[in-house]
Amino acid sequence: MQIRQRILSFIAAGILVSLACPSAYANELVVSDPEPHSETTERPGWVTLSFDESVEQDVVKILVLDQQGRNRAVGDLVYMGSAVMMQLDNDLPKGTYTVEYRIDRADGQTQGGTYQFAYGKGKWSAPERSTWSGDDEEPPVFEEKGESLPPSSASPSPTPSAVDTESAAPTVSESGISASPAPSLDPDDPDGDKSGFPVWILVGACVAAAAVAVVVVIVRAHLVKQPPGE
């Protein structure tokens, strides 16, 4: 809700400024937060820019570079017509930061500009140009810095189900033999015992029981035929 209110206030401010100061050029930056050459005492969480007209979402881009030239913007751009917001790194250290922005021009080409703000005491440097216009003037920084950093909370840990599924899946070695353990089967009986209990133990037990039964029958028959007293 707070983000939406901030965006709406910037849109309203942009409309008022554009009505009060009409310009022949389209899509000019009219409001920014933090403001150019401002020195904030609290760590800024966002960079917010408002333009005098709606900007093309596929074209607009914001870079927030620290003094070492690293892009400290994180996540995805928050877009709402003529206002855009870019989240900053939660571990943003004190220092001077350079905002580079790119939007579309009325004829379809790109245009943009740059300014600086500081978290703490600022050390300003004059940019080569504060604004530029046309695809041939677009600074290479937008291609060199690539995409913004992912938020620190955007690295999900693997779910237990995913880990279990992966560990349970059979793997195949270079020789083509499955590395997963398989139940022992009788070589003479391909079907084997599906319970995993060795078949030969069952067969041996049956044979031993039969042999004991035969011995018992023979002994009893011998005792019956033997005369009493012998």
Image: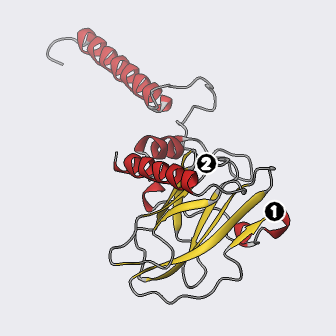
Q: Which residue is mark 2?
A: 179
Alpha carbons under labels 2 and 1: distance apart: 60 Å
Q: Quadrant of residue 67?
A: bottom right
Q: Position of residue 80 (x, y in %)?
A: 53, 45
**In this rendering, position of residue 21 left or right of residue 207:** right
Whether 198 is drawn above or below 117: the answer is above
Type of amino acid at the residue the image marks with label 2:
Ala
Please rate how many residues cluster around mark 2, counting C-alpha atoms within 10 Å: few if below 14, some from 14 to 19, many from 20. few
Q: Position of residue 88 (x, y in %)?
A: 47, 66
Q: Position of residue 112 (x, y in %)?
A: 69, 64
Name the residue at 63% across, 72% down.
Answer: 114
Q: Quadrant of residue 153?
A: bottom left
Whether 192 is drawn above or below 84: the answer is above
Q: Position of residue 222 (x, y in %)?
A: 29, 15
Q: Nearer the viewer, residue 142 or 22?
A: 22
Q: Nearer the viewer, mark 2 or mark 1?
A: 1
Whether 120 is drawn above or below 46: the answer is below
Q: Quadrant of residue 29?
A: bottom right
Whether 177 is drawn above or below 219: the answer is below
Please rate how many residues cluster around mark 1, counting C-alpha atoms within 10 Å: few if below 14, some from 14 to 19, many from 20. some
Type of amino acid at the residue the image marks with label 1:
Gly
Circle 1 sits in a helix, a strand or a loop, which is it?
loop
For the image, the number of numbered tags is: 2
Numbered badge on residue 220? none
Q: Which residue is mark 1?
A: 134
Name the residue at 64% across, 44% down.
Answer: 178
Q: Nearer the viewer, residue 79 or 175?
A: 79
Image quadrant in which the C terminus is located = top left
